[in-house]
Image (cartoon, helix red, strand yellow):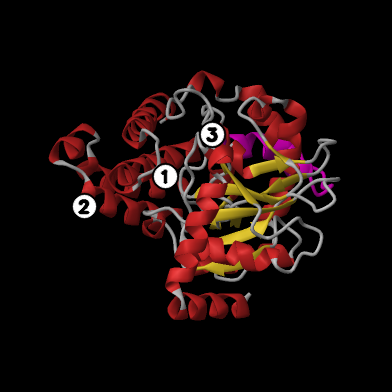
Amino acid sequence: MVALELELEKEMDDCPSKITDKLTLRSQSLGSEVADDELEIPLEAYTVLHGLAEEWTDISGNENLTLRQLKGAMTNEVFECHWALANKRGKPRKVLLRLYGESSELFFNRENEILTFEKMSQHGQGPRLLARFSTGRVEEFLNARTLSSVDLRNNQISDQVAVKLREFHALDMPGPAEPMIWQRLSMWLEKALELASPNQVEEFSLHLLHEEIANLQKMLRRSGEKIGFCHNDLQYGNLMIDDNETNLTIIDYEYASFNPVAYDIANYFCEMAADYHSDTPHVLDYSKYPDYENRRRFAAMYLQATGESVDEVEIDALVKETDSYRLASHLLWGCWGLISAHTSDIDFNYLEYARQRFQQYYLVKKISL
């Protein structure tokens, strides 16, 4: 991986015109295949992909690269990259190209995210890291399908998510096992206040949120609450399942950190309101939020995943704690949407998304506190 990065730097310094010509020709030869999307990738990304393909002897040529952008990503741009086999039989060689979003560094430390990605790979979780470059990376392409919004409301699949999430929370990961949610909320609120217009500050009552966060932290934090290594962004696009629907994988760890496990579960429940592949991907439908019986079913599956004996009191306590932590989820992603509205060039109505999350915060607060 390091050698590939060094080779890329040297080639770009020594012969930039050669790389530019190669990319131009590549774009032209792919024109008929990607004309609808008019895909463009950075020069260094193309060079990394070209270098990886040189190691494969079974493809028709490392220059015969086809790109397809995968929809639904809101922090990064993600592409499926494949090369046809020389014998024309069998499935093509595939990798996943991830280009970091313009505003992603505002939300998390990229080097920490890479370390998390590599540690997850050591634990046998998620895809392998194949190569890195300054604005993105290349990952192993998993032969599994991404879940849909409908899948999250399928009890059999949601049961698997519960079991997998219990395993995820118990992973041995570096760093202090201290909740990050409150620090992250405060940081994102400061950035939102910096970027928001006066009208947005007033509409979303941003000047009152420091006090809201402090009160929420005082209410939710308690001695002995279960802390685990949490994904923190468990939307359906970050869950994959094999063809037999028996092996579920959690991917994309940009926001992962230690947190109360109830917060991670609450965030998962909130994501059931979203359909990022619809004609209006920013619109949230909270009528799809799981009812009490389904929340209780998930909590029971989660607690029983390790084979321990669990009583009704423990299940009810986790449901209650999860219900409260959804308030933190709404505030956090409301701030994220507002920041992204000012910094991201991805085609998504971040401002309306933020508006819905803040509105839901106050609605839930009114009926639950």
For residue 338, above or below residue 10:
above
Residue 356 or residue 362, whichever sits in front:
356
Magenta span covers which residues?
Answer: 299-320
Q: Compare marks 1 and 3 and give the one earlier in the sequence.
A: 1
Mark 2 residue type: Glu
Residue ID at (50%, 59%): 23
Residue 127 % position (x, y) = 70, 57
- x and y percent of residue 215 in the render? 34, 45
Disc with the residue nearer the chain's start (1 vs 2)? 2
Q: Mark 3: which secondary structure?
A: helix
Q: According to the image, label 3 marks what residue?
A: 271
Identity of the residue furthest to the top in this view? 287
Give the left or right position of residue 98, taking residue 362 as reference: right
Q: Is residue 178 visible?
A: no
Label 2 residue SS: helix
Q: Nearer the viewer, residue 278 or 234?
A: 278
**Distance from label 1 to label 3 (Cα)?**
23 Å
Q: Main secondary structure of the magenta part?
A: helix
Mark 2, residue position: 194
**Mark sitting earlier along the chain (2/3):** 2
In the figure, is residue 277 to the left or right of 297?
A: left
Q: Is residue 87 shown left or right of residue 1?
A: right
Please give the name of the residue rendered at 43% of the width and 25% of the height, measured from the top-left corner: 283
Instruction: Report the residue at 69% width, 63% height from top.
Output: 53
At label 3, the amino acid type is: Glu
Give the labeled residue for mark 1.
Answer: 219
Quarter of the image with the C terminus in it: top left
Three-letter amino acid code of the residue under disc 1: Met
Of residue 334 and residue 169, the one placed in the foreground of this image is 334
Please name which of the two marks, 1 or 2, marks the residue nearer to the observer: 2
Mark 1 secondary-structure assignment: helix
